[in-house]
Amino acid sequence: MTIRSPWPVLTLILLLPLASCRQKKDVVVPATEATEEPGRAVYFWKTRFDIDESEQEFLKTYSIGKMYVRMFDVDYDASPAAGAEKVIPVGTTSFVSGKPDGIEIIPTVFITTRALDLSKQEEGGLPALAGKIVLRVGNMMDYNELGTFRELQLDCDWTESTQEDFFLLCRQVKALLKADKRALSVTVRLHQLRQSAPPADKGILMLYNTGALRSAGKQNSILDVSDVKAYLSRTPVIYGIPLDFAYPSFGWGVWFRGSKYNGLLHQTDFFNPEYYSPDGNEFTVLKDHVLENHELLKGDRIRLESSAPASINEVKELVRRAFYKYPHDNILYHLDSNNLSKYTKDEIQSIFAD
């Protein structure tokens, strides 16, 4: 029996199989004085691209020019159904809405470090993985009429031990994109500022999810100014590629049973006294109930985390001092009407402003 490769997108037009060293010393990109306002962009990080009316209005009101849209993840599948190929695309985004007018779509692909490591054992290794990613992204962009893309972004939480593999993948993807005069961008986490920069055309410094999500306590793992200070205390911060900056606009509940992390809750309203007892930004569950298909038990605790405008502006000031002023984009993570409705127009403007 022939097992179909999981890489093609599940539409007739995309049922074709996809095609199948060390980094040189970084070139330091000097900071220069900005001559214009920062560009404005947003991430879209859901598996269903369905832009509602309020989100369309948000894009227009704040003159958003670009959307970084998650297309799929690359992960490892050990199930028999995966066949010979174990490194596969998962969580492919389905496009219900068309491309918003005047918006440039930048396809973004998340890659797990496990997939990086195991792809080396498959036929063609990392160069083959690069070809699959670029071709699949191009097919998805064409089929969903998202326009010609000028940039592809790779998102990977690489570490010192996986740096060599990720950098090789970047070089391979960049070479494929260069043939069509397209750019490669990468996400950059704060801890990665202390490593060499990936071989990409630019990076997005992710100024969110800075803390220890799974650690119990009254912290805020989405954005804690002290976490950022630890990495931006040196001025200026010299990095090997130009950077744009992404700030959070979301909240969630971090659910614990005892000291054990149990998961994330997307609801952020835990003020019903029948079910929850507040203690600062933590809430104790008063009686068993089901929430978002999770069974919460009496005594469980929920840490409510948010992206406070005051904290974002403090971090923006740290960024100004660390990188000086140079042309860049300010980016919100991510486009979601429920989260964005919690901010005033002035608060949104302050995040986008330089």
Image (cartoon, rainbow, N blue to C red):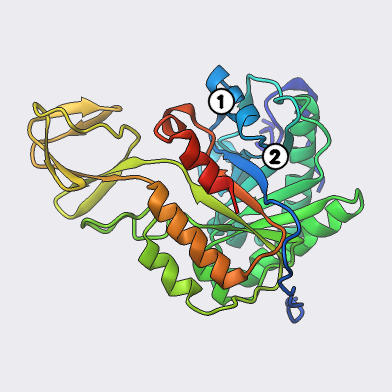
Quarter of the figure with residue 126: bottom right
Q: Please say whether residue 77 is visible from this viewpoint.
A: no
Quarter of the figure with residue 42: top right
Q: Residues within 10 Å of mark 2 (few under 14, many from 20)?
A: some
Residue 267 appears left or right of 180: left
Position above or below: 200 against 273: below
Q: Earlier in the sequence, mark 2 or mark 1?
A: 1
Q: Residues within 10 Å of mark 1 (few under 14, many from 20)?
A: some
Residue beneath disc 2:
66
Quarter of the figure with residue 12: top right
Position above or below: 259 against 158: above
Residue flagged by tag 2: what amino acid is it? Lys
Spot occupied by residue 307 in the image (x, y as percentages of width and height): 39, 47
Residue at image coords 60%, 33%: 92
User: Which disc number belongs to residue 55?
Assistant: 1
Q: Please say whether residue 54 is visible from this viewpoint.
A: yes
Spot occupied by residue 175 in the image (x, y as percentages of width and height): 85, 59
Frontmost residue, 95 versus 139: 95
Position above or below: 172 against 236: above
Position above or below: 281 against 211: above
Measured in 3D between alpha carbons, the distance from the residue under mark 2 to the one under mark 1, in whole angstroms, is 14 Å
Marks 2 and 1 in Cβ contact (< 8 Å): no
Residue 172 appears left or right of 188: right
Spot occupied by residue 244 in the image (x, y as percentages of width and height): 65, 57
Q: Quadrant of the N terminus?
A: top right
Residue at image coords 46%, 60%: 315
Residue flagged by tag 1: what amino acid is it? Glu
The secondary structure type at the circle numbered 1 is helix
